[in-house]
Image: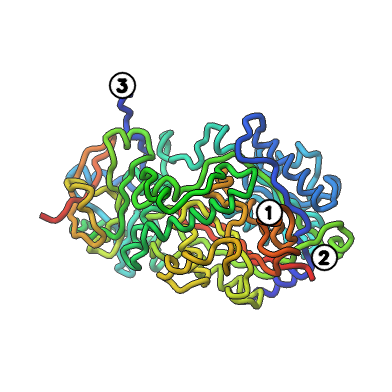
Amino acid sequence: MTERREKPFLDPPEESGPFFDAAREHKLLVQRCTSCGKHQFYPRKVCIACGSTDVEWVEASGKGTVHTFTVVHRGIPGWVEDGPYVAAVIDLEEGVRMTSNVVDCPREDVKVGMPVEVTFVEEGKYVLPRFRPVA
Amino acid sequence: MNHQVLKDAFERTRLVGAAVSDYPLTPDMTELDHHVVGIRNALDDAGLKLTDVDGLLTASGGGPMGSMGLAEYLGIRPRYVDGTSVGGSSFVYHAARAALAVGSGLCEVAVVAMGQLGRSGGNRGYRFRGRGGGPGFGSFFWDSLAGLPLVGAYAMAAQRHMHEFGTTSEDLAQIAVATRFHASMNPKAQYQDPITVDDVLSARWVAEPLHLLDCCVVSDGGGAYVITTAERARDLPKPAARLLGYGERIGHAGIGQMPDFTQTVAADSGPAAFEMAGLKPGDIDCAQLYDSFTITVLLLLEDLGFCPKGEGGRFLREALRLGGPLPINTDGGGLSACHPGMRGMFLVIEALRQIRGEGDPRTVVRPGGVDTCLVHGVGGQLSSHATLILGKDQ
């Protein structure tokens, strides 16, 4: 019997602290530029739309659609032991994209364009946003 | 876009030699050995000596601090070095940098070298960056939170292409089949047994919609090529190749930041290279396209303008084999022959072979060599792109 390995996780980039703090309270944060108003993800200390360094955290609606996805069968120790899983890129309502997993859904039923909503799952040292089909 | 500086440099320089060190499995060689043997073989091919070399470029190095360690080990003191490191495409980027350096007189004989033990080194090709702990960076970090392996990144591009354009797994399989056909005539290729579309479709999933045979092999390998002045090239024993056009572009790093999953920045680097060369896609006799995965080739055929966006599936059913209108990856590619991790080097080596028309007559596009060969390198996750058009030195 193979030993169950833990999922390997990197330490978070320094500027991402508020994102993970909020996730523990089941809130999904993205950034918004206070100069041009554009949202962005992943978090940075600079707005990639206008170059301003005045970016703030705002709560996202948590609703979006599946932009694309893959069912991963082989890959990363710690991840594959529980069987194939769905990695996906989600288009959030705020106009930003987030790479995540689609959960609470048979993997055969995942489709591009499928409406999804955020749910939060404890993974190792993180609580992470995952996405499930809209009920 | 003004390419005049690069164009002038290309006018004054030639690709005069290229050779592999060895591949696909070399348990008795180090990565440094691959650089050293590759350089010796490429210099032999060019008719030059190590003492002629005064420019050194590498992204792998085989020793400490890239080209510095390699230079010391070779016992040379280069006047010009470059370590541009943007993944598998790096060794195509190096061609333009070497030609700029030689063309502007910064050095006279520039060698570009590469060696990697993707198989024997215990590094199974691309390593998942989340394995070892430590702080993450940008998209690589955020994508890793979803357990996304490298193949998954390419699979997501394939999935979106299928959604938007109706591309099928059969379409992608055609690329693997044509590449294996070429590998079947390359006695060094890691896999040489011909395969069918059904073989690809019945192979196990790695990351849907990519099957095992949609993915590159994991190899050891290396090689080198030599660029020197046009004057010096005239006295060398073998035919040289001209550098006709070049373009490069960085799109993103991790796939999560790719703006359009069905279009790479080859759509920028390609037209830049064609404009500089004064050529159109239809003028190209053969192409060496980075084939990390079958979807990579499909996207490149579209983005470089060999067929309209979305029509790659239809196009490649006929075109890609030796004897077809656009033979690609005539050495068996990364899908079947050799992919140590950063394959760009092998694209340039194979391009020079096709321009000279050297080797097994079954495996050359045209006896006596082709007039034009396009090389396109891809690094990262469809991220860094370089297009290089090479031509016969008439």
Local crowd size for mark 1, using a 10 Å CA cut-off: few (<14), some (14–19), many (≥20): many
- What is the three-letter code of the residue carrying label 2? Ala
* Residue at far right of view: B235
Q: Which marked residue is nearer to the observer: mark 1 or mark 2?
A: 1
Vertical placement of B196 versus B34: above or below?
Answer: below
> Is B287 on the left or on the right of B19, as rendered?
left
> Is A81 on the left or on the right of B111, as rendered?
left
> Is A82 on the left or on the right of B21, as rendered?
left
* Residue at far left of view: A135
Q: CA distance from mark 1 to mark 2?
A: 19 Å
Q: Quadrant of residue B120?
A: top right
Badges 3 and 1, same chain: no
Q: Considering the numbered disc 1 on the image, is that residue within a helix, a strand or a loop?
A: helix
* Residue at far top of view: A1
Residue B137, image x and y in percent? 43, 47
Q: CA distance from mark 3 to mark 1?
A: 46 Å
Residue A94, image x and y in percent? 25, 63
Numbered mark located on residue A1 in the image? 3
Badges 1 and 2, same chain: yes
Residue B191, image x and y in percent? 55, 43
Tell me if residue A45 can be seen: yes
Q: Considering the numbered disc 2 on the image, is that residue within a helix, a strand or a loop?
A: helix
Q: Quadrant of residue A85?
A: top left
- What is the three-letter code of the residue carrying label 3? Met
Numbered mark located on residue B349 in the image? 1
State the residue at coordinates (58%, 45%).
B338
Tell me if residue B142 can be seen: no
